[in-house]
Image: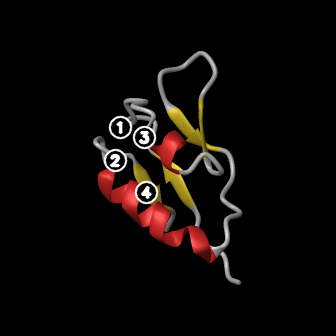
């Protein structure tokens, strides 16, 4: 199995709605003491790709992005 491309949460856009943490808890968590989410694990196999594409599309702030 391959790995999905690296991704990140744009802290300037994130509203910490929690959708990403609910959808993919293997990758996202709340930043302690802040009102935003962060990526703590980008080492996900390609079986996570559909979930990642969905949460990227569904993020109300469009804050989850692929690294270039």
* Relative horizontal placement of residue 64, taking residue 48 as reference (left or right): left
Q: Nearer the viewer, mark 3 or mark 4?
A: 3
- Residue found 42% across the figure and 40% down from its top: 19
- Residue found 53% across the figure and 52% down from its top: 8
Pick whichever, 67 or 46, lies toward us.
Answer: 46
Residues at circles 2 and 4 in contact by the CB criterion of under 8 Å: no
Of the numbered discs 1 and 3, the one sitting upstream in the chain is 1
Q: Which residue is mark 4?
A: 65
Asked which secondary structure carries label 2, the reply is loop
Q: Residues within 10 Å of mark 3 (few under 14, many from 20)?
A: some
Q: Which residue is mark 1?
A: 13
Q: Which residue is mark 3?
A: 19
Asked which secondary structure carries label 3, the reply is helix
**Marks 3 and 4, Cα distance to the nearest angstrom?**
15 Å
**Marks 2 and 3, Cα distance to the nearest angstrom?**
7 Å
Q: Quadrant of residue 33?
A: top right
Q: Which residue is mark 2?
A: 59
Residues at circles 3 and 4 in contact by the CB criterion of under 8 Å: no
**Residue 35: which disc?**
none
Q: Position of residue 27 (x, y in %)?
A: 62, 50
Asked which secondary structure carries label 1, the reply is loop
Q: Nearer the viewer, mark 1 or mark 2?
A: 2
């Amino acid at each position: 199995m391959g790995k999905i491309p690296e991704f990140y949460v744009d802290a300037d856009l994130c509203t910490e709605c929690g959708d990403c943490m609910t959808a993919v808890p293997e990758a996202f968590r709340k930043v302690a003491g802040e009102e935003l989410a962060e990526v703590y694990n980008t080492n996900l196999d390609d079986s996570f790709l559909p979930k990642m594409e969905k949460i990227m599309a569904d993020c109300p702030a469009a804050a989850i992005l692929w690294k270039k």
